[in-house]
Image: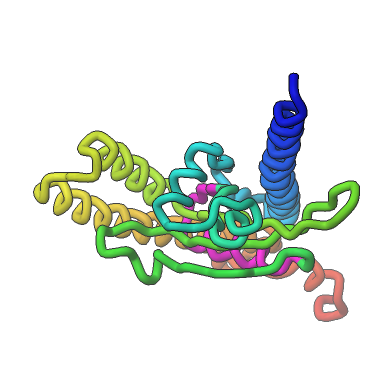
Amino acid sequence: MDVQEVSSGKQMKELKNELVRFMMLYKFALDELNTKIDILKQEFHYIHDYNPIEHVTSRIKSPESIIKKVHKKGYSFTLPHIKENIKDIAGIRITCSFISDIYELSNMLQNQQDIKICEVKDYIKNPKPNGYQSLHLLLEVPVFMSDRVENVCVEVQIRTIAMDFWASLEHKIYYKYNKEVPQKLVDELKEAALSAAQLDRKMEGIQKEMNQLKDTVSTEEDLQELLIDKERFFLPPDFFSTGFIK
């Protein structure tokens, strides 16, 4: 083996190590953010006796997928340029039951002191032309390595079950037709998106009514019943311990 071959082998090893280290940064950023989400989920459950999160999934783009995007966008094939220009290498998708849960969870994430909010795209209030709805957050998460701290971007998509179902179906259809989808299906997808949005609003309304009924029942259970001339009154327990009745 000559000197040139040794040098080439060393460069390949260094390149491989840098690439592995680069991808590990995004894995660690996902781990960090997933831990935060789990803590918020448990805290919300203990305090409010309710879990706003139905499901959480995360993924890291494969090196092949990253290279394709770099080539498509015309970016430089260097790791610093890739990190600077491609912001969705690491992604988390959170599925909630209701639209109000989406904004509640978004606020909780944005209030984390060590997270930097890079961008917010609200496709719920402003759906895409094809009907797509979701709330996108681009968050910068600090990752503490042995020799440095790296701030890594993670894209977070928060949507309802109905929104997620629609997006999954739309993706499958576009994949099957290689993005050349017949106009009839495009129109039907748009109509389905409107139906999904209507369903979300309907379910949100039902949830609010349930909460109001629950509050009413809880309030009445906490009150003491008093019967006067066949009329029923509900009074707070401390009413009977005051000097009003002697």
Whether 96 is drawn above or below 226: the answer is above
Quarter of the figure with the C terminus: bottom right
What residue lies at 24% left-to-right and 34% top-to-bottom?
176
Q: Position of residue 103 (x, y in %)?
A: 54, 65
Q: Position of residue 111 (x, y in %)?
A: 71, 69
Based on the picture, tell me whether residue 106 belongs to the magenta stretch: yes
What residue lies at 69% left-to-right and 39% top-to-bottom?
15
Classify residue 48 by image quadrant: bottom right
What residue lies at 37% left-to-right and 59% top-to-bottom?
133
Q: Position of residue 139 (x, y in %)?
A: 63, 62
Give, as a single range, the part of the protein colored magenta: 93-112
Based on the picture, tell me whether residue 136 belongs to the magenta stretch: no
- Which residue of the protein is positioned furthest toward the left in this rendering? 184
Decide which of 137, 178 is in the foreground and name it.
Answer: 178
Classify residue 151 by image quadrant: bottom right
Q: Position of residue 70 (x, y in %)?
A: 48, 51
Total marks shown come to 0
- Which residue of the protein is positioned furthest toward the top in this rendering? 1
Residue 42 visible in the shown view: no
